[in-house]
Image (spheres, helix red, strand yellow):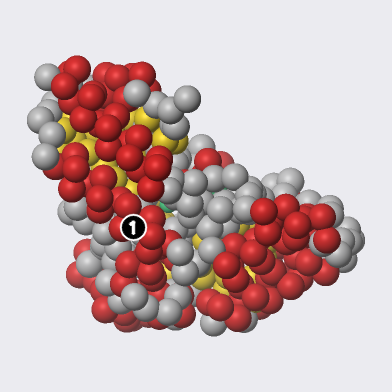
Amino acid sequence: MSRTADLRSDTVTKPTPEMYRAMADAELGDNVLETDPTVGRLESLAAEMTGMEAALFMPSGTMGNQCALATHTNPGDSVIFEDQAHMIWYEGGGPAIFSGVITRGLPTRDGTITPQQLSETVLTRSEHTPGTTLVCLENSHNRHGGAVTTVSQPAALKEAADEAGIRVHLDGARMFNASAALGVDIKEITGLVDTANFCLSKGLASPIGSLLCGPSDFITEAAFWRKRLGGGMRQAGILAACGIVSLTQMVERLTEDHERTQALSGHVAGLPGIDPVDAPTNILVMNTVRTAEEWMNELEKHGVRTLPFDKHRLRAVLHKDIGDAELKTALEGFSKSAEALA
Ligand SMILES: *Cc1c(COP(=O)(O)O)cnc(C)c1O
């Protein structure tokens, strides 16, 4: 039987053998009544790696981001996002529901807001105007094809935010992909924001979980929001055990996914009717002449699973369960599909 290549998302990864062992051996407690010891170890590790004072284990990236937003803001505040941000596109309208904030999406070419754009958009609270209190960044940027913001850009942005007196939250669902692509320690990215949330359940291959990182008093308040939103999980150490494996064993290998993404991108560039955009990390976005849905359906016949982003944009994501054999399946599937759709 031929292999399949599931490129719908890096969330489809299955736990590693080490993760199954870690789950079986995890020391557990009730993480609502007290700190589950394994959750505690994961949170300490995350805080240490990101250089933040504290970290909080979250059931999902969405909850981590929305708890961060609710903790940073008051209802009626104005919050700045990049126009294509996951937090406004894919989190169920959470900013309106849980935080009651006004969202302002700034259009960019590459997912990176400039300091000038920020300064021009910040509103000072007055009798008439809702004040801006927060800007949310995304790195790597999902809807911009895994685009990476260089370290100097957020440094300038943080300066502009400090000057305007607003805080900076990073939706860093794939921030370890960004640091791998830039070849810098993760602290160089997290050092330029006030708070950051990253996913264990994407390229880092854990089944479930995210970590919200930030100052201790912020994390204490965010824990209240987590509970309020129903995110208090009891023997969560069974999941945190996988997260520890993610942070200790799965970070270094992310460059492998980036290399295979390049291989796929190079191959697709040579095919008619489909045009890959620059892919610095593990997300390959392709502009298609026929609809993205037609491509998805055709690819599926050849064992390759993808997802449409928009009517003429298809997304493929690489991850640890796409080795060389699966990559070969993907390359062949794209070739055959290009022929069929010509
Ligand atoms: C996946 C993702 C999230 C949310 O993570 P979930 O765990 O799926 O809720 C947030 N931001 C970005 C950029 C993502 O890609």
Name the residue: 83% across, 69% down.
37
Name the residue: 33% across, 49% down.
283
- Which of 116 and 46 lies nearest the eye of the viewer? 46
Amino acid beneath label 1: His
- Which of 340 and 163 lies nearest the eye of the viewer? 340
Q: For the view shown, which residue lies furthest in the front direction?
A: 1
Q: Is residue 9 above or below residue 50?
A: above
122 with respect to 185 (left or right) = left
35 with respect to 152 (left or right) = right
Residue labelled with disc 1 = 258
Name the residue: 78% across, 51% down.
233
Residue 213 image offset from top left, x and y in percent: 58, 70
**Is label 1's Cβ within 8 Å of ligand 1?**
no
The image shows a total of numbered marks equal to: 1
- Which of 167 and 153 lies nearest the eye of the viewer? 153
Residue 186 image offset from top left, x and y in percent: 45, 75
Report helix, strand or loop for mark 1.
helix
Q: Is residue 139 above or below residue 62?
A: below
The part of the image, by quadrant, that contains residue 238 is bottom right
Name the residue: 32% across, 52% down.
260
The part of the image, by quadrant, that contains residue 235 is bottom right
Q: Is residue 199 visible?
A: no
Q: Is residue 340 visible?
A: yes
285 with respect to 93 (left or right) = left
Residue 120 image offset from top left, x and y in percent: 22, 65
